[in-house]
Amino acid sequence: MKKKLLFIYNPNAGKCKIKDQLSDILDEFCDVYSQVIVSPTKKRGDATEFVIEYEDDRDCEIVACSGGDGTLHEIVNGMMKRNYRVPILYIPTGSTNDFGKSLNIPKNMVEASSMVNTGKLFPCDVASFNSKYFVYTAAFGIFTETSYSTSQTLKNMLGHFAYIINGATELTKIQRYNMTVEYDGQIAEGVFIFGAISSTSSIGGMKSITRDDVEYDDGYYEMILIRDGRIYEYPALINDILRGNVNSEKVIYAKVKNIKIKSEEDVPWCLDGEFGGIERFVNINVHQRAITFMIPDIEEKQNLLKIEE
């Protein structure tokens, strides 16, 4: 058997549903590892601290985590701050789970935990945001506040619908930001109402906001900027955001490695669905294949199905 697995989970994520399957998840881990360390989070930042705490334990061969995108964000930040990194197995249990969908991780928690035995390793890109890190999106502007301002209680009661309710209120308070954006030798200036630097198949549960050709290990993230317009243009602008229309004159799209953003106003940022701070200057760099994730081995699963037939 393998040596040691560290399991970090958020007991309150996704209507607290992990509590009913915790025993089955641990059974999957114990079938492979001789020792499983279980560390439930109690407050923001716990997951990051747990990952860093076990850096010097070289017997700990993998970090498994369960929770929403916020929990994953903390895990990735902890792992990126380590000199010695190990693979991450992610069991999504949040309300949207954008990154889990991107990597085709099963929604069933026990099935996801079984990747510890049947999955394969996938080196994935991670981006730095000043002194922090994010794995799938850094965003500002309209609708982005919804991710971190929606209460956990409301998320647990209504699931993804809670984001829709909270997001509707943002239509009445659109913020505008005067910015200069430098990216890979180009410059974009103007007033923007939305921006996202992402590597994901969906943002906030909206699959159509991103392109279909996203790759997660090519060293590039996708940048989308939406320029401000007149009031009567807002419905079309919002429609462009929801449809991922990068051909609009109000939309700037590019695949980027390095981005510097300077703003004349304070800009609240959302990192992986969590509040990322208020900044006037942001330096974003993509680190290719910086974190290794366990993902489903689709080919192996297809071969097993053929054998069963």
Image (cartoon, rainbow, N blue to C red):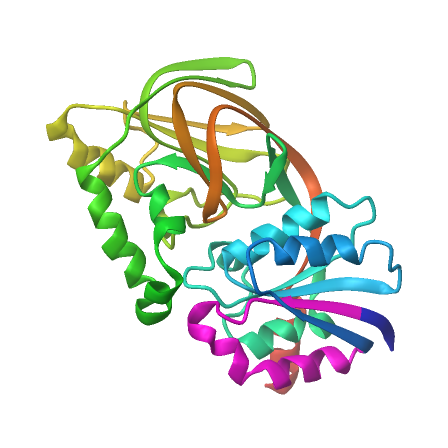
User: At 32% from the left edge and 29% from the top edge, which residue is drawn?
Assistant: 247
As drawn, 245 above or below 294: above
Q: Is residue 159 visible?
A: yes
Locate residue 278, reporting x and y percent: 45, 32
Residue numbers of the magenta segment: 5-33
Question: Left or right of 164: which side holds 208?
Answer: right
Quarter containing the N terminus = bottom right
| Residue 157 highlighted magenta (yes or no) | no
Q: Residue furthest left?
A: 232
Locate residue 266, reporting x and y percent: 40, 25
Write down the quadrant of residue 286 in the picture: top right
Quarter containing the C terminus = bottom right
Question: Left or right of 221: which side holds 191?
Answer: left
As drawn, 107 above or below 165: below
As drawn, 29 above or below 241: below
| Residue 27 highlighted magenta (yes or no) | yes
* Front residue of 66 and 200: 66
User: At 53% from the left edge and 80% from the top edge, which residue is drawn?
Assistant: 19
Write down the quadrant of residue 184 in the picture: top right
User: At 44% from the left edge and 46% from the top edge, which residue is drawn?
Assistant: 212
Question: Left or right of 299: which side holds 250?
Answer: left
As drawn, 279 above or below 10: above
Locate residue 99, reporting x and y percent: 52, 54
* Front residue of 302 and 168: 168
Q: Is residue 102 visible?
A: no
Locate residue 215, reporting x and y percent: 56, 44
- The tally of labels here is 0
* Front residue of 304 and 122: 122
Question: Left or right of 117: which side holds 232?
Answer: left
* Front residue of 261 and 258: 261
